[in-house]
Amino acid sequence: MDTRIMTLSQAVEGYLLHIAARRLTETTITGYTRILKLLKAHFEHDPPLASLTVEDIEGFLAEAGEDVSDKTILNYHTVLSSFYTWATSRRPPLVREHLMRQIPRPKPEERTVEPFTEAEVRAMLNNLGTSKAYDRPGKRTTSHSLRHEKRNRAILLVLVDTGIRSSELCTLTIADADLKLRRLHIFGKGKKEREVRVSARTAEAIWRYLAERADARAGDPLFITDEGHKFTRHRLGRVIAKIAERAKVRNAHPHRFRHTFAVEFIRNHGDPFTLQDLLGHTTMEMVRRYLHLAQVDLDEGHKRASPVDNWRL
């Protein structure tokens, strides 16, 4: 088999055979199998193993780590590290780089949440229409206009305006977007449905993009690839990574927009319980982390909420 085109699922199958041959416990094998099954499910299509990037793995860890304990996300890192150690030790190697060595091992007591800054989001929005500058033999450095500027602007605005998961964005259809009421109908984890609002600017960006797709029908994907297909999380991550590269924004993956929305929602005095509903969380665990990161001033919060102060008792 040509290792250059070995898919993720083929590699996972080989790795599971490897750990079974090492006579690990049934509990260990079951746990490893479950985590690697989640990794495969993170990508709607089966990508070549060698095509995966650090951003892909970070995006998986960020999304899979919602609503689970710190110890569980540490287990995810351990399993993926073992998988990549195996992949790099094959002869010939299945991948050139051990991606997990570029991803810090999470500390059980604290999970990193890294929102984008306003400057980073603005930089990405300002780098949608023009390619990176490049040299041509005998000519001046130049750049060229990029396709899909309207689509990519709408995607970025939806992600930062709603905090929806990348998988949720990929499954949106045109019928799910009510631009008059400025609402998106979301099908979330566990087939749970919810509605989220978008700003007028985001609704306008979606309208401008759809105006280019005159033949689109209600059941078609809201966002489509260059080939006219529904986005996968893997493909969406690639688009975000390219935009971020042009904007010189590091460590960019779709899930960071979710963190950004959540932290800014709290900083702007949004209600934590409303945030839980908007994000589709089943527990308050992640919301509490956003509260801590946003450094909400509890004293000021008490002043605003205190019945004694407000009622002048």
Image (tube, rainbow, N blue to C red):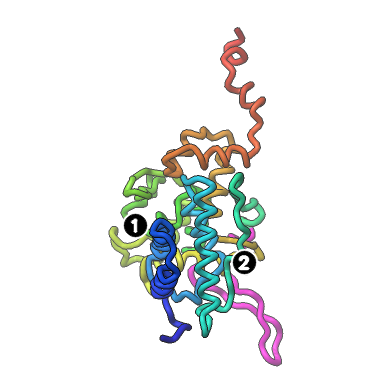
Q: Which residue appears at 46% of the width and 46% of the height?
A: 198
In the rendered view, tell whether residue 227 sits above or below residue 296: below
Identify the image quadrant of the N terminus: bottom left
Identity, as a three-letter code, of the amino acid under mark 2: Arg
- Label 1: which secondary element: helix
Asked whether, in this view, residue 112 is left or right of residue 255, the answer is right
Q: Residue 299, position in %: x, y?
A: 66, 25
Give the extent of the magenta segment: 123-148
Q: Which residue appears at 57% of the width and 41% of the height?
A: 289
Is 39 one of the magenta-colored residues? no
* Residue 42 visible to an observer of this rendering: no
Q: Which residue appears at 40% of the width and 56% of the height?
A: 27
Which numbered disc flags the more N-terminal residue, 2 or 1? 2
In the rendered view, tell whether residue 224 sits above or below residue 61: below
Q: Select label 2 or label 1 by which is in front.
A: 2
Asked whether, in this view, residue 124 is left or right of residue 159, the answer is right
Q: Residue 140, position in %: x, y?
A: 71, 85
- Mark 2 closeness class: few <14, some 14–19, many ≥20 residues within 10 Å: few
Pick the front one: 208 or 136: 136
Res. 249 mark:
none
- Label 2: which secondary element: helix
Identity, as a three-letter code, of the amino acid under mark 1: Ile
Which residue is denoted by mark 1 in the rendering? 174
* Residue 123 visible to an observer of this rendering: yes
**Please, which residue is most extreme toward the front here?**
23
Which residue is denoted by mark 2 in the rendering? 101
